[in-house]
Amino acid sequence: MNSEWSLDALYKGYDDPKFTEDMAKLDACCANMNALAAALDEKPKTAATVEEILRAMEELTELVSDLITFAELRAAANTRDAESTSVMGRIMTKLSAVSGAQARMQAWIAALENLDELIGGSGMLTDYQYLLSCVKADSKYLLSDREEEIVARLSISGANAWSELQTFLTSSVPVEYNGGTTNLSAIRNLAYDPDPAVRKAAYEAELKCYDRIKDSVAYSLNSIKLQVISECELRGYESPLQRTLHGARMTRGTLDALIGAMEEEMPAFHRYLRLKARALGHENGLPWYDLFAPMGGSDRRYTTEEARDYLLNLFGGFDGALRDMVRRAFDEAWIDFYPRDGKAGGAFCATLANQGESRILTNFDGSFSDIVTLAHELGHAFHNLNIFSHRPLNRDYSMPVAETASTFNENVIVSAAVRASDDRNEKLALIEGQLSDACQIICDIYSRYTFESAVFANRSERFMPADELCRIMLDAQKKAYGDGLDHSALHPYMWVCKSHYYSGGLSFYNFPYAFGGLFARGLYAQYEKEGAAFVPKYKKLLNATSVMSVEDTAKIAGIDLTDKTFWKQGLRSFAEEIDEFERLLG
C-alpha cells in the first residue's frame, strides 16, 4: 500500500504540459472576467447576462480548484518546497487581479430589482438560487472594485504570508528529544504513548522547542488578527465574529444556544477528567501530558492495511457508497499517512472537485486514535462525494456543517467498536477514547473560542507578545477545563501549534468542531432509532449543506438549532458514558 498520496489526477508535476496549459487558461479566464466586468454597464439586465457571469465564475473556479489545490497539497507534504510556495504566490497574484471584477459582478447582480423573476425563468439560475440570494446579502459588505483588488493584493504579502510563516516554523522546528532530534508532529504523537515517562518527556520537549519560534509566531498571529479587524471595519462588519457567522450562513442565536449549552454541561467533562486523573495517580487534576494517555487495551498498534480493513468492515454496515469510497481512498493513493520532517502536522481532507475525489493528509502512528482520525477525514471525503453533483459554484459548504460527516463517521466507528467488545480493557480503551475526543470538541474548543475572542478584543488596542499570548491561553484553559486539569501543568503554547488561528479569511475556526460533534451526535441518535431508513435522509442533508443555511439544513432532520435543548441533549448523553467509564475503572 502507498505511504504517500498521488496527485497525478491533478498534474504529474509543474513540468506537466497540462499544468502549463491550465496556467495559460487561467490568464485568459482572468482577462475574460475583467473584460466582462468592464462591459456590464452596457449589458442588458437579463437572465442571459447573469448566466454569462456565472459561467465565467464557474470556469475560474474549476481552473483555480485544480491549480491551487495541487500547489497547496505539494506544500503541505513538504513545507520546504519553495517552488510550490512560489506557484501559490503566482496564482494568488493572478486572482487578486480579478477580485475587483468579481466584486463588480456581485454588485451588479445584487442591484437587479427583478432578480427573483429572472431566477424563475432560467434553469441555471434556479440551480444557483441560494448562491444568488447570498450574493445579494453579501453585497452590503463589498468594497469598491479597486479597493477589493487592493485588499486581495495586500493579503498575499500580509495575512497569507504570515500564515505560511507559521506553517513553515511549526513544521520545521527541531525538537530535541531522547538524545536526538525529531519534529513537532512526531513529538506530539507521543502524547498517546502508553509509557507515562515518554508522555511527560515529550510534553517537556515540545514546550521547550516553542521557545525557538514563539516570538516569530506571535508576530504572525498579531499581524493576521489586526488585518482581520481592519478589514471588518472597512467592510462594515460589527466584528470578526459577526463576519464569521455571516460567512457560515449561521445565526448568532444558534451560536449562543450552542455555547450556552456547553457552558452549562461542561462540569460533566471535568468529572471525567478527574476520574482519569485519579486512575493515573494524580490528585490535583489531570496534567496536560496525560490528557491523551491511553487506558485499558489501547496499546495495540495497527498497520495501514489493518486500519483499512477495520474501516471497511464497520462502514460496510452503514452504507455501500461510503464503503466503496473508503476502499478507493486506500487503493488509489488518496492518503499521505506518516509524519516526516517538513510535512505539515495534524490532519486534513482536501477536495479534488473536478475529479470527484479527495486527498487526505494525516500523521499516522498506528493507534486506534489514528484510525478514528482517518474515519474523521474520510467523513469529509464522503461529504464531498455527496455534493459533487452540484454545479461548480454550489460545492462549498460553511464551517459549522463542515464537521458533520467527519464527526458522524467517528460515531459510527467508535459506537460499533464499543458494542462489539466484550473485553473490559478494550471497552475501557474505546469509551475513554470517545470521551477524550468529546472533551476535545467541548472543553478544548471552548478554550480556543475563549482565547480567540480575547485576542481579537486585545488586538484592537495593542500588540500581544508571546508571553502574554501564553497567559491568555492559560486563562482560557483554566476556564474551559476547570478543576479537571492540574493548573500547574497546562499547555501555554497551544496558540502556536494550531493552524486554525492563522487565516486572514477564516476566523473562529473552533466552534464549528463543537457544532459538528454535537450535531453529528444528534444525527447518529436518529440513525440508531431509524436504521437504514435514515441513510437517504442523511445523504440528502449532506447534499443540502452547500445550498442552504445551517438552520435550514438541520430542518431536513427535524432539528431546531436555536433551541438550547437540542444541544443539551447531546451533551447530557455523554453522562452515561462517563458513568460506564467510572464503572470500568472499578
Image: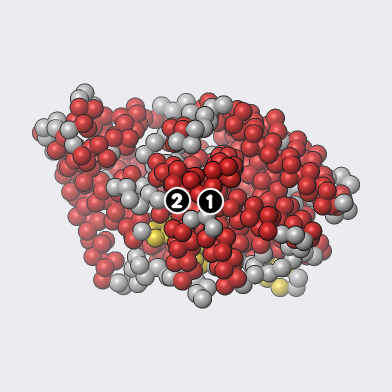
| Circle 1 residue | 406
What residue did someone put label 2 on? 383
Proximity of marks 2 and 1: CB atoms separated by less than 8 Å: yes
Q: Is residue 404 above or below residue 292?
A: above
Residue in the image at 74% along x and 66% along y: 299
Q: Position of residue 122 (x, y in %)?
A: 18, 36
Hey, which residue is sitting farthest top in the picture?
Answer: 113
- Residue nearest the observer in this picture, 289 or 392: 392
| Mark 1 closeness class: few <14, some 14–19, many ≥20 residues within 10 Å | many
Q: Determine whether 505 is above or below 70 in the image.
A: above
User: Residue flagged by tag 1: what amino acid is it?
Assistant: Ser
Decide if residue 272 is in sight here.
no
Residue 361, position as x, y percentages in the image: 51, 62
In the picture, measured across the screen, residue 467 lies left or right of residue 239, that is right
Between marks 2 and 1, how big is the CA–CA gap? 8 Å
Residue 418: image quadrant is bottom right
- Left or right of 140 in this view: 171: right
**Which label is found at residue 180?**
none
Local packing at callout 2 (Cα closer than 10 Å; few below 14, some 14-19, many 20+) is many
Along the line of sight, which residue is nearer the eye, 344 or 414? 414
Q: Residue at x 83, y 48 (%)?
A: 583
Give x and y (percent) for residue 569. 64, 34
Closest to the observer, 513 or 198:
513
Amino acid type, mark 2: His
Judging from the image, what secondary structure is the residue with disc 2 in? helix
Residue at point 62% right, 61% down? Answer: 370
Check the image and report above or below for 65 versus 442. Answer: below
The residue sitting at 57% across, 60% down in the picture is 314
In which image quadrant can residue 453 be found?
top right
Foreground pick, 421 / 306 = 421
